[in-house]
Image: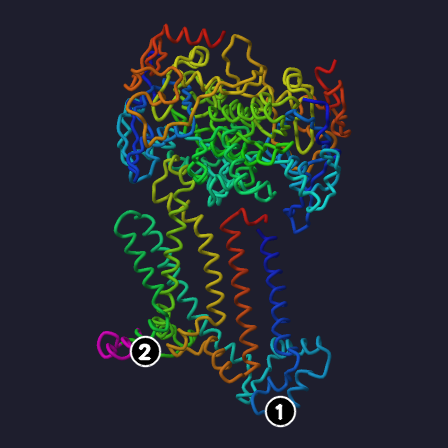
Amino acid sequence: MPESPVLKVSDLKVTFATRQGPLRAVDGLSFEVAPKEVVGIVGESGSGKSVSMYSMLGLVRDANVTITGSVEFQGREILGLSDKEMQPIRGGEIGMIFQDPMTALTPVYTVGWQIVEQLRTHTTMTKAQARERAIELLSEVGIPDPRKRIDHYPHEFSGGMRQRVVIAMALSCNPKLLIADEPTTALDVTTQAQILDLMVKLQDSYNSSIVIITHDMGVIAEMAHRVVVMYAGRPAEVGPEIDVVRNPRHPYTWGLLGAVPRIESRNDRLATIPGNAVSPLDIPEGCAFADRCEYRMDICTKRPQLKGANDHLDACWLSDEQRVAIRTKASS
Amino acid sequence: MSNEILLKATDVVKTFSTRSKKFGRPHLATAVNGVSLEIRRGETLGIVGESGCGKSTLARCLVQLLPTTSGSVVFEGVEISKLSRRALRPLRRKMQLVFQDPYASLNPRRTVGDIVAEPLRINKFGTEVVIQERVRELFRTVGLDVNSLTRYPHEFSGGQRQRIGIARALALNPSLVVADEPVSALDVSVQAQVLNLMADLQDKFNLTYLFIAHDLGVVRHVSDRVGVMYLGEIVELGDADELYDRPMHPYTEALLSVVPELNDTDAPRRERIILKGDVPDPADRPSGCSFHPRCPVATDKCKEVKPALVEIRPGRSVACHYPKNAG
Amino acid sequence: MLSFTLRRVLSAVLVLLAISVAVFLIFFATPGVDPAARIAGRSASPATLEHVRAAFGLDRPIFIRYWLMMDHLFIKRDLTSYVNVGLKVVPQVLKAAPVTLALVSGAAVIWLVTGIFGGIVAAANRGKFIDPLVMFVGIAAVSVPAYWLGEVVNLITQSRLHSSLFAWVPSAGYIPFTQNPWQWALHLLFPWLTLAALYAGIYARVLRAELVNAMNEDYVRTARAKGLSERRILIKHALRCSLVSIVSLFGLDFGALIGGAALLTEVVFGLQGVGMLTYTSLQNLDLPVIMACVMYGSFFVVLANAVVDILYAFLDPRVRVA
């Protein structure tokens, strides 16, 4: 893509100092988000996918955290900006949607109040204008009877409806980038479909780029143009969605895709990844996945770098021939 | 799988009284509304539905962890829904539960060895030596390190804790294991390990599973037969492959159509049916068919007449006036 | 909101009714004791006893007796103390009530302001030296007994430094507000501060804990992601949600203090409030006064609780429907 990226993350590292030693939550994450692009970050719990997003927005408020690397938003370095400098960006240019709509809204204010608050923080609208805009937004996200519902409190909405309110709020200032942290994980599948559908529609009309964080490969496949697969705070595989899903290159991605039970067909046994996720307290110097990898080699004690062709990169020492051999054997 | 019926439920109803929003007039929420089903020995019956559909309540009623409001439950030929607690006790050991949150269901102050040994001690399984040997055997069976018997639940990962929960459930050689969302708190790679383990155990010990989950993929993977629940009722019941490949109820069809698809073949994408609105309040059921306010094919008849769950083909039932794929 | 308020007031009235019955039963229907003798006090003459029996209808059915009692207390308000012969009880309580009310209300304003301010300052400066400092002052204020603090304050302002620094401090006592507002405030200043110290300490600590919890809530993260300033997040979001627990705490404390729990402060500063009245009547076994004080005290506890619940519903919309 010729246009300069909206977001460019390079070698992001997030480390928490703990009593047991340094906890490396994010360990060298790099990716770009082009204008109007949807990038999915997928990984299991503890893979650092949420922490990476929170830390770059300055939402990790832990005194023991060290964040290094670079995060450029529209060409401007935002890592290390003060709270004051970040405030116009947060909510104004980067909107966020959270996992649990039940707790993401302040319980004591009406939803209208909370949307108006955001509008008035970032624009010069009057109260009346902001209220009109809020009604418009609620109607856009599909809340029936918005003129009445605007004065309702969060607890008077269902989970799906609350997530719509959160989305309306995130979009209220026409952000260039929307970060959605597991936006449908807490929702039922029919509600999830409604919300994903809504996000796709809104992305069309608002032209924002989206970073969607999820553990669900299916959601990635529905939403994302490009995928970052994370393991132990590091990117294992990065590439266009269709390539990663159809021709996964990293053994972790193979396991992840094979472990999902499908509704289209049924096989007797699911592929599994042996063992448990590596603790972020002792990530090995070499490949973080090596301990659970069936194909581990001697060289795996050295850390592999992301490499590859055609925008499809992976961090693994296996050669192309080895991979072809393994995959052919697996599918036969 | 045999044709022997292990558990048969007929018209099970469970209501909860909740306080109404206006003045303290109590009103009733029907969590389970007249469910009839059979579980055959050795099979896995999956119950799938969205949150609040009553699937967990149904499971608890079937094993009498919750008293049923009305209806009958016959387990191994004994009507258990009217038994006293004391009379029920000898049957309890044959019906064991595995819960969703493996952490919340294990006592954090006891060693995992003690936790697994507890049902054995309560039921006077044998001398302490025999019990310890049995615990060790159970640990090996579920793939846990026997040397970790003296450790505490918090020292284990989510997947391992679920293995402990399974070991505890298997301790007394139950015939029926009710698994209520056993893998929904786990990461996919660990989820696959636990599902594979459960399948192995079923083969080894000829277990019967009642498997409750909201994840449609997981349910298809584990189940021989599947029941789909909506608002406290079973709207469709049948052979798993049959039901997934040719759903009859519009709700089942919509549910299956919206599961995010992995898009890893050239097959055309499914046509997605996005339901409008939310599930109604079980205290305020719609008239006629419970699903009619959200149903894309509802007619006036559906607003007035409640469809019964009827067997369209042997082993294939649906509660809809206009079932699809019925021909 | 209106229906909630009505319901809450109605239930408060019912509770008061129940309390009045309970108090009545304790004083008049305890088996084996002659209520007349208790009302009349120690070594009463037979004539007095006879008078008491007639006045309270002690030979009549129990509900008539209850009615007569309430009549004496609330309608005729002519309940008389037999220990201090001829002293009308109700006016006595009504005279003591404003003193207590003034003492507790003034102290409440001080402790709420300082407690909430202290809690916010501590929470906003978590991890800096000011937080433990505020918390230390708080725990010190909580630990010092009110009567001891009062005595020390008296010692300094009335005696040791009275001729120099604290010459402006009036001697102990109470001046009605209607008589001289300035003197009223001046007389109450040190009682207020003394009583408020303890509660300010508690409130600051409770609020800090609540705020620290609230700042970790999801909605605060949302507020940050909205680009709000830290100050606005703390005040408009975290504090607003934390106030709910402060309000419920306040209701209990305020009700109890009005009902007589400010006794020690009243005694130390020579204020003739309800606590003091109850205390003397208990010493004299002056039953009518005790009864009136109990009724008065429970009235305020119940009233304060009702007000708190209504305020609670005002602060937290989720309570309104329940």
C218 left or right, relative to C69: left
Q: Position of residue A219 (x, y in %)?
A: 49, 21
Label 2 sits on residue:
C170
First in sequence, mark 1 or 2: give its number: 1
Residue C148, by quadrant, is: bottom left
Residue drawn at 55 percent across, 69 percent down: C298
Residue B322, by quadrant, is: top right
Label 1 sits on residue:
C48
Amino acid carrying mark 2 in the image: Pro
Q: Could you tell me which quadrant the N terminus of chain A lies in?
A: top left
Q: Is residue B27 above or below residue B287?
A: below
Image mark for residue C274: none
Residue drawn at 48 percent across, 61 percent down: C251
Amino acid carrying mark 1 in the image: Thr
A227 left or right, relative to C296: left
Chain letter behind tag 1: C
Chain letter behind tag 2: C
Q: Which residues are magenta?
A: C153-167
Q: Is residue B321 visible?
A: yes
Q: Is residue A151 visible?
A: no
Foreground disc of the pair 1, 2: 1
- Label 2 Cα crowd, 10 Å radius (few <14 / some 14-19 / many 20+): some
C159 drawn magenta: yes
- Label 1 Cα crowd, 10 Å radius (few <14 / some 14-19 / many 20+): some
Residue drawn at 64 percent across, 32 percent down: B176
Callout 2: SS:
loop
